Amino acid sequence: MKISLEQFDKAFENRIRLQVMSVLVANDSYDFNSLKELLNVTDGNLASHLKALEKESYIIVNKSFIGRKPNTQYSASPAGREAFKKHLQALENLIRQQKQ
């Protein structure tokens, strides 16, 4: 049986980006430090994956200050939510095909 990979979104091929989107789709927003701690990744690693998702317009970035400390909040954009939903559906379809 031939498997079509066309429905899969390359933006979610990396496990960290997949995890980030899972967190952001399940929550209204998440700040950088909380994401870093939750996913157990370095600043640079997380920043590069967030930049990749931002480039695809899958996440929304809100920068502000809490007192004098910078705070960056991330949330899933409507396009990101839709792309993630389609990616998950493609994964479910793949699993279903393998059961037949």
Image (spheres, grey):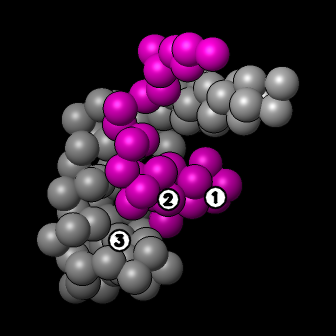
- Bounds of the magenta span? 1-30
Which residue is pictured at 39% across the width and 42% down the height?
A: 13
How far, Cα to Cα, is label 3 from label 1? 14 Å
Identify whether 96 is placed above or below 27: above
Residue found 55% across the figure and 19% down from its top:
3
The amino acid type, in three-letter code, at marker 2 is: Gln
**Does residue 31 appear in this view?**
yes
- Marking on residue 27: 1
* Disc 2: which residue: 19
Looking at the rendered structure, the secondary structure element under dot 3 is helix
Quadrant where the C terminus lies? top right
Badge 1: residue crowd in 10 Å (few <14, some 14–19, many ≥20) = few
For label 3, the residue is 32
The earlier-in-sequence mark between 2 and 1 is 2
| 41 relative position to 100: left or right | left
Q: Residue furthest right?
A: 100
Residue name at image x 82 percent, y 32 percent:
99
> How many labels were placed on the picture?
3
Mark 2 to mark 1: distance in Å? 12 Å
Dot 2 falls on a residue whose secondary structure is helix
The answer to whether any part of residue 92 appears in the image is no
Give the residue type at disc 1. Asn
Q: Nearer the viewer, mark 2 or mark 3?
A: 2
